[in-house]
Amino acid sequence: MVVWVMSDAQINDRTRIFVDELGLAERVLFLADPKSHLIRELGLLKPDPEPIEKGVPHPTTLLLDRQGIVRFADVRTDFHFWLDPESVRTALADLE
């Protein structure tokens, strides 16, 4: 199961269009993190964001096993550099 958690700052018309155009609603469970409680608890907010980044967390990929234990974590402090999909495939294979 793929879960995408978003801060309040990320929930807008632009996000809805992105989700609709890619047909993600059928494949991904989208959850809102009101007031970024979980995002803050995980330390994923940028410490001194630009105005446009306020409330938006660092792009993060977490893979959990069936018991809810984090088995893979990747946090990107620069959103210009994304996680290589092959790294995710390898981490998923390691879970099996």
Image (cartoon, rainbow, N blue to C red):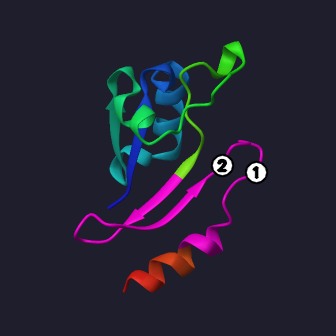
Q: Quadrant of the N terminus?
A: bottom left
- Please say if 87 is above or below 54: below
Residue 46, position in %: x, y?
A: 62, 30
Q: Which quarter of the figure is the C terminus placed in?
A: bottom left
Q: Which mark is residue 13?
A: none
Q: Looking at the image, do the residues carrying marks 2 and 1 touch, with CB atoms under 8 Å apart?
A: yes
- Position of residue 8 measured from the top left corner of the image (x, y, whole percent): 42, 21
Magenta segment includes 83? yes
Residue at position x 63%, y 27% in the image:
47
Magenta-highlighted residues: 61-88
**69 up-or-down from 35: above or below:** below
Please tell me which residue lies in front, 30 or 90.
90
The tag earlier along the polypeptide, 2 or 1, is 2
Give the residue displayed 56% in from the left and 28% down from the top: 56
> Is residue 54 rendered to the left or right of residue 29?
right
Task: Report the amino acid beneath label 2.
Answer: Arg
Is 61 placed above or below 8 here?
below
| Residue most extreme to the top | 51
Q: Is residue 90 left or right of residue 80?
A: left
- Near-viewer residue (33 or 38): 38
Tell me the element at label 1. loop
Q: Residues within 10 Å of mark 2 (few under 14, many from 20)?
A: some
Which residue, given by chain and number where applicable, does mark 1 sit on?
Answer: 81
Q: Which residue is mark 2?
A: 76
Question: Considering only vertical position in the picture, is 63 above or below 95?
Answer: above
Amino acid at dot 1? Phe
* Location of residue 18 (image quadrant): top right
